[in-house]
Amino acid sequence: MDKVVLAEALGSITEHWRPKVVGALNGQEVKLAKFQGEFVWHHHEGADELFLGVAGTFRVEFRDRAVTLGPGEMLIVPRGVEHRTVAEREASALIFEPAATRNTGNFVHPTLTAPTGDT
């Protein structure tokens, strides 16, 4: 039972779009990620996904609208809903989702798909 200092954990992340697991509970993982640029369109067939803004601003885009998140703001993307994240400048988020959820969901990308359980 060690505390997690988000600023320190984010400082250890050197790659964009590569979530780092910082905690786990009840079959769920708490991840931190840095975003910059555009991610790929994807969905998670069997899992909802929570984004909580930590630093900077980013958008969660859907095919029909976009939601901008900043520090302290959160959004839950329901399972099966196609989306992508976009950040004009570097931003970071806490992500909460079931363990072993692939960051690119139903889409496998040669460089953006992260191994599940990345720590």
Image (cartoon, rainbow, N blue to C red):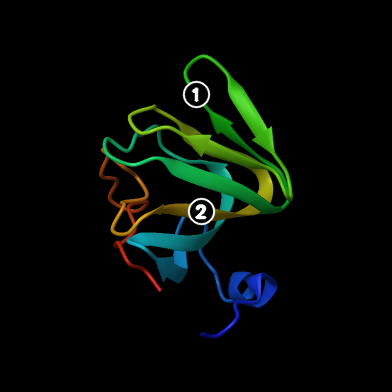
Q: Report the side of 103 relative to 8 (left or right).
A: left
Of the pair 19 and 37, the residue shown nearer to us: 19
Of the pair 60 and 80, the residue shown nearer to us: 80
From the top left corner, tell me how far across and down residue 49 is, in percent.
44, 43
In the current view of this chain or complex, which residue is farthest to the bottom? 2
From the top left corner, tell me how far across and down residue 6 is, in percent.
65, 70
From the top left corner, tell me how far across and down residue 78 is, in percent.
42, 32
Query: In percent of the image, x 46 and y 67: which residue is there?
Result: 20
- Looking at the image, can residue 19 be seen? no
Query: In percent of the image, x 28 and y 50: which residue is there?
Result: 110
- Mark 1 residue crowding within 10 angstroms, few (<14) / some (14–19) / many (20+): some
> What label sits on residue 95 in the rendered view?
2
Query: In percent of the image, x 57 and y 76: which residue is there?
Result: 12
| Quadrant in which the C terminus appears | bottom left
Above or below, 59 relative to 31: above
Q: Are marks 1 and 2 in contact (CB under 8 Å)?
A: no
Q: Is mark 2 on a helix, strand or loop?
A: strand
Q: How many labels does the image show?
A: 2
In the current view of this chain or complex, which residue is farthest to the front? 26
Type of amino acid under label 1: Phe
Q: What element carries label 1?
A: loop
Quarter assignment of residue 8? bottom right
Please report whichever mark, 1 or 2, sits nearer to the chain's N-terminal start: 1
Q: Report the side of 90 relative to 100 (left or right).
A: right
Label 1 vs label 2, nearer the camera? 2
Quarter assignment of residue 57? top right
Give the Cα distance between marks 1 and 2.
17 Å
Above or below, 85 relative to 33: above
Of the pair 53 and 11, the residue shown nearer to us: 53
Tell me the residue that label 1 is attached to: 62
